[in-house]
Image (cartoon, rainbow, N blue to C red):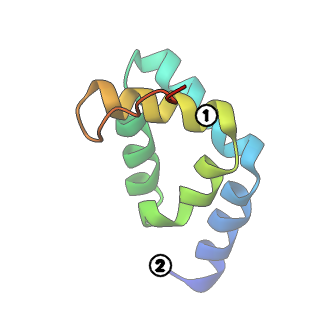
Amino acid sequence: MSIVVANNILEFISSETNFIKVIEDQVRISNGEYIDCIVHFCQKRNIEVEQIVPLIKNNPLFKSAFQKEAERLNFIKKKKGKKK
């Protein structure tokens, strides 16, 4: 992939709003999983998944939905509630 194309992709996904809208639209349209849609998004654009991690981390609602899905699919351990 050329540097110009890579920079254009990164400029697009660096806009958190664009990235989240694309993923949420895809989840809704395909009735799929966030994880699958994110991986598909990255594969289609020939970018590494690690490049979009900051976009997920910076949006609490998106991060929460992603985390709940990963817990439900047993990809990560469920977070335990705070002890009183």
Left or right: 24 as drawn, with respect to 70 = right
Q: Position of residue 10 (x, y in %)?
A: 65, 66
> Residue lying furthest left in this view?
74
- Residue position for label 2: 1
**20, 7: nearer the viewer:** 20
Left or right: 55 as drawn, with respect to 39 = right
**Against 82, is 12 above or below?**
below
Left or right: 74 as drawn, with respect to 49 = left
- Residue visible at 73% across and 48% down? 16
Query: In which quadrant of the rendered view does residue 23 lie?
Result: top right
- Residue visible at 63% across and 64% down? 9
How many discs appear?
Answer: 2
**Against 9, is 71 above or below?**
above
Please name the amino acid that badge 2 sits on: Met
Q: Is mark 1 on a helix, strand or loop?
A: helix
Residue 62: image tag: 1
**40, 65: nearer the viewer:** 65
Mark toward the viewer: 2 or 1: 1
Residue 33: image tag: none
- Residue visible at 66% across and 30% down? 61
